[in-house]
Image (spheres, rainbow, N blue to C red):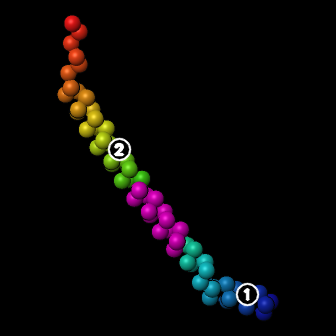
């Protein structure tokens, strides 16, 4: 029983677990920001191309 307690205490004192969790949270936040930025840029590009496409008149057939 004492060895189990010692292992539990050493596990809780180790900093590897919290560090990995912190990196995972940072990575998740970075991914969310990247997805939001790409979505916004894609929508802006789509509206710009649509505006330009509707502004250009097709050539007339002669």
Judge left or right: residue 7 versus residue 24. right
Judge left or right: residue 27 versus residue 20. left
Q: Quadrant of the C terminus?
A: top left
Q: Residues within 10 Å of mark 2 (few under 14, many from 20)?
A: few
Q: Residues within 10 Å of mark 1 (few under 14, many from 20)?
A: few
SS type, badge 2? helix
Residue drawn at the location 29% of the way across and 43% of the way down: 44
Residue 15: mark? none
Percent across and percent down for residue 53 are 25, 29
Quadrant for residue 58, please give it: top left
Percent across and percent down for residue 34 are 41, 56
Q: For the stretch drawn in magenta, what is the main secondary structure?
A: helix
Q: What range is drawn magenta here?
A: 22-34
Judge left or right: residue 54 versus residue 24. left
Residue 41 lies, with reference to residue 14, above or below; the image says: above
Q: Which residue is mark 1?
A: 7
Residue 52 lies, with reference to residue 17, above or below; the image says: above
Residue 42: mark? 2
Residue 58 lies, with reference to residue 13, above or below; the image says: above
* Front residue of this view, candidates 27 and 12: 27
- Does the stretch in magenta take in 55? no
Judge left or right: residue 16 versus residue 6. left
Q: Quadrant of the N terminus?
A: bottom right
- Does the stretch in magenta take in 27? yes
């Amino acid at each position: 029983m004492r060895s189990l307690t010692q292992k539990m205490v050493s596990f809780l004192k180790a900093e590897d677990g919290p560090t990995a969790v912190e990196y995972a949270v940072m990575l998740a936040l970075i991914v969310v920001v990247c997805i939001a930025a790409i979505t916004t840029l894609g929508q802006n590009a789509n509206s710009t191309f649509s505006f330009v496409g509707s502004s250009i008149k097709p050539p007339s057939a002669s």
